[in-house]
Image: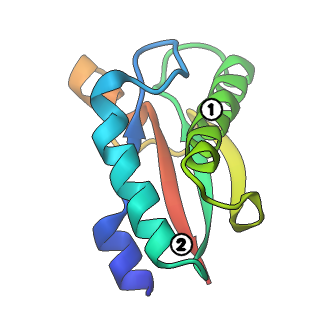
């Protein structure tokens, strides 16, 4: 299951300084919902991440809002709240460390992590 989760579930990306799910992320979100509905025993954590700009405190709050935005969208899609945890890492665990827009975009995400 963990391998299928890693291959099937996609991160949800956000615009700079925002935590609303973008229109172009709806297909990825729907794919996540479809997969999770087919595997009702999977539990997971949504990690909220930000790029390196802004204070640690600000980004921790923004990451929390991003994780909860993804959580709320999944719950609206029919995924049970008992399966979902959220955590914010703010800018503390970047996926990409270069200081440019392409890299920053990769860090502004809700990252879904399989729970054993």
Taking the image as shown, residue 105 lies to the left or right of residue 61, namely left
Residue 40 drawn at (x, y percent): 57, 77
Q: Quadrant of residue 24?
A: top left
Which of discs 1 and 2 lies nearer the camera? The answer is 2
- Residue 33 falls in image quadrant: bottom left
Tell whether 73 sits left or right of 95: right
Q: Position of residue 112 (x, y in %)?
A: 50, 57
Residues 95 and 46: in front is 46
| Residue 41: quadrant of the picture | bottom right
Residues 74 and 101: in front is 74
Q: Quadrant of the C terminus?
A: bottom right
> What residue is drawn where x is 75% and y is 22%?
57
**Residue at which label 2 appears:** 114
- Closer to the chain start, of discs 1 and 2, is 1
> From what the image shows, is residue 108 above or below residue 89?
above
Crowdedness of circle 1 by 10 Å Cα count: few (<14), some, many (20+)? many
Q: Quadrant of the N terminus?
A: bottom left
Q: Which mark is residue 63?
A: 1
Mark 1 → mark 2, Cα distance in angstroms: 18 Å
Q: Looking at the image, is 103 positioned above or below residue 2?
A: above
- Most extreme residue toward the left, as rendered? 102
- Local crowd size for mark 2, using a 10 Å CA cut-off: few (<14), some (14–19), many (≥20): some
In this rendering, the answer to whether 97 lies above or below 54 is: below
Q: Position of residue 104 (x, y in %)?
A: 34, 26
Residue 98 showing in the rendered view: no
Q: Residue at x 40, y 67 (%)?
A: 35
At a point 55% along the width and 22% down the height, the residue shown is: 19
Disc 2 is placed on an element classified as: strand
Contact between marks 1 and 2 (CB within 8 A): the answer is no
Q: Position of residue 16 (x, y in %)?
A: 43, 14
């Amino acid at each position: 299951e963990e391998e299928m989760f890693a291959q099937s579930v996609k991160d949800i990306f956000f615009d700079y300084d925002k935590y609303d799910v973008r229109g172009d992320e709806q297909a990825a979100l729907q794919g996540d919902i479809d997969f999770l509905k087919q595997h009702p025993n999977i539990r997971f954590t949504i990690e909220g991440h930000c790029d390196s700009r802004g204070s640690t405190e600000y980004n921790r709050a923004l990451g929390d809002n991003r994780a909860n935005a993804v959580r709320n969208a999944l719950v609206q899609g029919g995924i049970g709240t008992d399966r979902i945890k959220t955590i914010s890492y703010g800018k503390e665990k970047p996926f990409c460390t270069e200081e440019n827009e392409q890299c920053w975009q990769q860090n502004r995400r809700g990252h879904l992590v399989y729970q054993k």
